[in-house]
Amino acid sequence: MSDEAIPAAGGAVGRRGRGGAGARRAARRGGPIQQLRAIERKIGLYEVLGEEGLELIEHNAETVLEEIGIDFRDDPETLALWKDAGADVQGERVRFPRGLCRSLIATAPRQFTQYARNPERNVEIGGKHLVFAPVYGPPFVRDLDQGRRYATLEDFRNFVKLVYQIPALHHSGGTLCEPVDVPVNKRHLDMVYSHMRWSDKPFMGSVTAPERAEDTVEMARLLFGAEFVDSHCVVISLINANSPMTFDDTMLGALKAYARAGQATVVTPFILAGAMAPVTAAGVLAQTLAEAMAGMALTQLVRPGAPVVFGSFASSMSMQSGAPTFGTPEPALVLYGAAQLARRLGVPFRSGGSLCASKVPDAQAAYESAQTLLPGVLGGVNFMLHSAGWLEGGLASSYEKLILDADQLGMMQVMAGGIDLSTDGQAMDALREVGPGKHFLGCAHTQAHFQTAFYRSTVADNNSFEQWEAEGGKDAAQRANTLWKKMLAEYEAPAIDPGVDEALGAFIAKKKESMPDAFA
Amino acid sequence: MADEDEIDLRSLGDQELVEQMWDDLYDGLADEVVEGTNILLERGWTPYDVLTKALVEGMRIVGIDFRDGILFVPEVLLAANSMKSGMFILRPLLAETGAPRMGKMVIGTVKGDIHDIGKNLVSMMMEGAGFEVIDIGINNPVESYLAALEEHKPDILGMSALLTTTMPYMKVVIDTLKEKGIRDDYIVMVGGAPLNEEFGRQVGADAYCRDAAVAVDMAKDLIQRRHNQRAPQ
């Protein structure tokens, strides 16, 4: 938009103007997407635990590791690694001397870069940075026209294309929805390819089997070059602990495959408090820290220096039904505390998202999502999965909610930028120019800044009642429905080297031919 | 666009020049609008044609894009200021030639109400559309309105209020006009955030205007209808 900077009111302008209505309409109705770089936080962090509390939780986590231990199921290699590292291995139960996991994690980077095929989209993960990534995992999709249905590969591609066009989503994410129309053993190839081909943002890898993780790395080598991949992080993947205090061979296999390749993992205890952890925040925090430290330490045993992120997914639950609940205060407290623990451990932190239990993009969805998004931003999350599109406790990816959430992410990005205290930001010239009893709309400072001064919502309607009614009296979800359809219609794929695209296609075809379809 | 920097308005044909003036109004280039206005007058255009075909039409385009959310308030302000620069030249000429006027409006916020941003926006848009606007400011008792009507003899009286506690005063003003038998001498338009159509009707106004752009459309429409009514006289 720099080409349409507005001169000071009444000031001299070039002999000819800026092209009148035609130029302004073209610039403001369309034009290239102005993507945003990941957030560099300039506001303070909100913390809920003091030094004493943090030490207490850390002490309790070490007690869990030392006294109770963690199960590593069906994975002799991992058990051997732990034995060599000095842990006490009894069957599949591993108990850790106090401080062992923490000292192993010291080789993990405090902050790292995940590279994208377009260098403009590289993201910093850790430190003051905050990366927004979309919803991950739902088997269903939902939109206003067709309702709730199983997701297909077409839905998956649609979500990749939409996320690609959303400036405040800095990351393409991973399992945007589960394309259940493609055989389970081949699905990951189409999913990873979709991220590589239809977006140029960084993405996540497959974790549903160790060989699928290796396929992901192999495809990344084709896209980025084998040498580059060995020395740079180009894929980040989600490894969940089977809370309480258990890791299974699927997750461990994927964790080791990625760590071995020098690629990033997010080790996340997935906790519905009350069922998979104690009901109290302090209990959830101690267990989360213990599980996460055990998983993160394992990455360092496989390859010291491999990037790894401390993840925390904590929800409360309805004790009447057992259903997970979102947007409640207790998980927010856990998030704030876990972020503090991650900072003390010296690793990046993943949590939060626009989480909700609502089935439709309604007031419940909005409130619940806001109540997890805001703690994530204020608490110091570095990598925020599920930041847009999540509905129904993660069972459905919503086209409309993706758009609604993304609008909020744009607002969070502005807020995290803090207050501009430059001379221009102080606006003393505007105060002097206008003085008492007049308005600021015409003053030079306003004329210079009005376009970018305030975040402009893509979905909020701020018009008069009469105009809103004349335009169909649409609610936010209906407006979002119009928007995502327009975005898909106007989508243009980012360019890709045809040789690379061909190599990816050949790899996928060969892999698919090598095995019969399997739906398990 | 470098070659366009050198455009000489005098080298343009009439139609091209008028279209360039629409762009210049849109872009808020007051000096260029003044120059274009002078050139058309030199070429023998009547002041009325310059007003309607170049300036008012240009502002009509601005109004459309304001309504559609393409233009921002500060940009419309610049465009309206450019329009006023052109009007400054035309107004005495229009008076001399006895050309039909767009219309004149007296506008002010009602007694007790000092909130005037909305009223200022309406003034700006009305002036941009070629109306002559006499802004009597804030906190006006009925006497101020009467004095302004007497002095300026406008076509339109505009009243604005932001507060539910001050908006009933609009009825006081209109009732006073009725008592004095001069209510039908004026088009009365009301606006402000807490108002709606029904309120406008209840206080006896001719129109409720939900925003500044609508106020201009309403004003044009009501003036047109009044002309039609009076034509047979």
Image: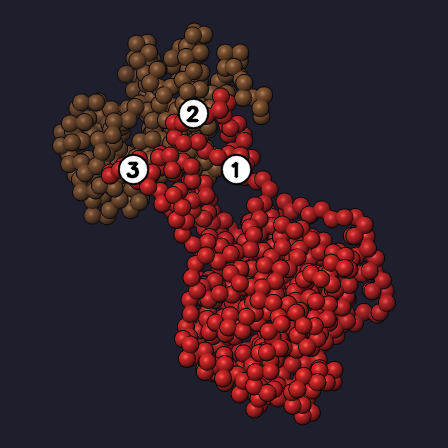
Chain colours: A red, B brown
Mark 1 crowdedness (10 Å alpha carbons): few <14, some 14-19, many ≥20: few
* Residue under numbered circle 1: A2
Q: Nearer the viewer, mark 1 or mark 3?
A: 3
Q: Quadrant of residue A395?
A: bottom right
Residue at left offset 42%, top offset 40%: A450
Q: Quadrant of residue B220?
A: top left
Q: Quadrant of the N terminus of chain B?
A: top right
| Residue B153 horizontal side relative to residue A124, left or right | left
Give the residue type that dot 1 points to. Ser
Q: Quadrant of the C terminus of chain B?
A: top left
Give the residue type that dot 3 points to. Arg
In percent of width and height, residue A513 lies at: 86, 64
Q: Secondary structure at mark 2?
A: loop
Residue at left offset 54%, top offset 18%: B6
Examine the rendering and report whether any part of residue A82 can be seen: no
| Residue A214 horizontal side relative to residue A487, left or right | right
In percent of width and height, residue A131 lies at: 56, 59
Marked residue chain, label 2 = A
Is B128 drawn above or below residue A328 in the view shown? Answer: above
| Residue A434 horizontal side relative to residue A422, left or right | left
Mark 2 crowdedness (10 Å alpha carbons): few <14, some 14-19, many ≥20: few
Q: Which mark is drawn over residue A432?
A: 3
Of A373 and A362, nearer the camera is A373
In percent of width and height, residue B102 lies at: 34, 21
Give the residue type that dot 2 points to. Ala
